[in-house]
Image: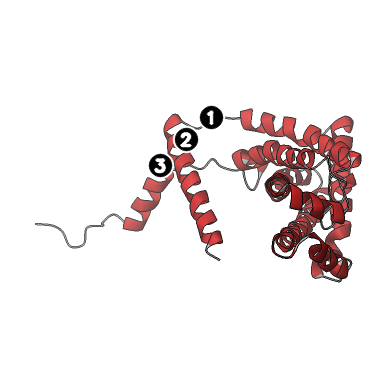
Amino acid sequence: MKNPTAPTANPVTSVGAWLRAALPVERWGTAGFPGRWVGGAAMVLAPLLMLTGALLRARFHFFYPDQLAAYAQHPTLMAAAYSLFAAGSVLLWPAVAVVATRIGARSAGWGLWGGLLVISGLFARAFHAGVDHLAFQLVRSQGVESAGQAVSAGYGAFHVFSALNLAIVAGWVVLALGAWRTRVLGPVRAVALGLAAALPLGVLKGTTPLSLVALAGLCAGLVPWGCALLCQGPRPSRAAVLRWVPLSLVTLGLMVLFGQAG
């Protein structure tokens, strides 16, 4: 006969324990949020995606009328270029979070302000990417001339994110100075990271020689660090990888379908 007072297993705890065993997540450790794997992968992928996008549109003049004309003639190429650049820009935030955490462990002020300014600037770039997308859709629906007139009429109009334009430039300088002062990065790689401040900002900005210098500096500052971060510590088990990869791909696919549904 069962004892009615005997303790029973908590189903929530059991489910939680099963999930932790099936889909293990490494502790953040010194990398801080969002952890070694996400932060390291972002450090490697984000600059390379941005550089690839910039190179794809490099043969077209950087100002918006030429960018719109280029989209009319090469829609797939330009859509890929802007999409890769935007994806890399958004993916930079986990990388910046890890950099700011490392700096903040030695100097809270430099880590705080460098991280806040850069991530705020990334929000502004995401807004610019949305305007770019709308402008390209105007090219498809109304033609280059009408799209150019619409962009020209709204160019310079006030929007909330325009207040963050200074953060786009100043953030990388503060973050690079913080990395150098705290010896998180050596002087050469800190300067390379600070070159990201030279990346042109705004709507429908194409690629200039200065863009390529800035993105090359971003790659030099973050990619080796990301590779080193990914190589630190234990590797995940094969079973964990075989569970996480399909789940991540399915989740990404569902997010795309949900986004296309409006």
Residue at which label 2 appears: 241
Report the coloring of the rendering: secondary structure
Query: Do the residues under discs 2 and 1 have CB atoms within 8 angstroms?
Result: no
Identify the residue shown where x is 80% and y is 32%. Answer: 220
Mark 2 neighbour density, 10 Å: few (under 14) some (14–19) many (20 or more): some
Q: Mark 2 falls on what kind of element?
A: helix
**Sequence-first tag of 2 and 3:** 3
- Work out whether residue 165 can be spotted: yes
Mark 1 neighbour density, 10 Å: few (under 14) some (14–19) many (20 or more): few
Q: Is residue 209 above or below residue 130?
A: above
Q: Nearer the viewer, residue 130 or 226?
A: 130
Direction left: furthest residue: 1
- Work out whether residue 109 can be spotted: no
Considering the image in quadrants, where does the C terminus appear?
A: bottom right
Q: Is residue 250 left or right of residue 233?
A: left
Query: Where residue 151 appears, x then y in whole percent?
Result: 83, 65
Query: Where residue 145 appears, x then y in whole percent?
Result: 82, 62
Q: Amino acid at mark 1?
A: Arg
Q: Nearer the viewer, residue 193 or 70?
A: 70
Mark 3 neighbour density, 10 Å: few (under 14) some (14–19) many (20 or more): few
- Mark 2 vs mark 1, foreground winner is 2
Report the disc number at residue 191: none
Q: Amino acid at mark 3?
A: Ala
Report the disc number at residue 21: 3
**Sequence-first tag of 2 and 1:** 1
Q: Amino acid at mark 2?
A: Val
Q: Is residue 145 left or right of residue 242?
A: right
Q: Is residue 246 above or below residue 67?
A: above
Marks 2 and 1 sit apart, C-alpha to C-alpha, by 10 Å
Q: Nearer the viewer, residue 238 or 196?
A: 196
Considering the image in quadrants, where does the N terminus appear?
A: bottom left
Residue at which label 1 appears: 235
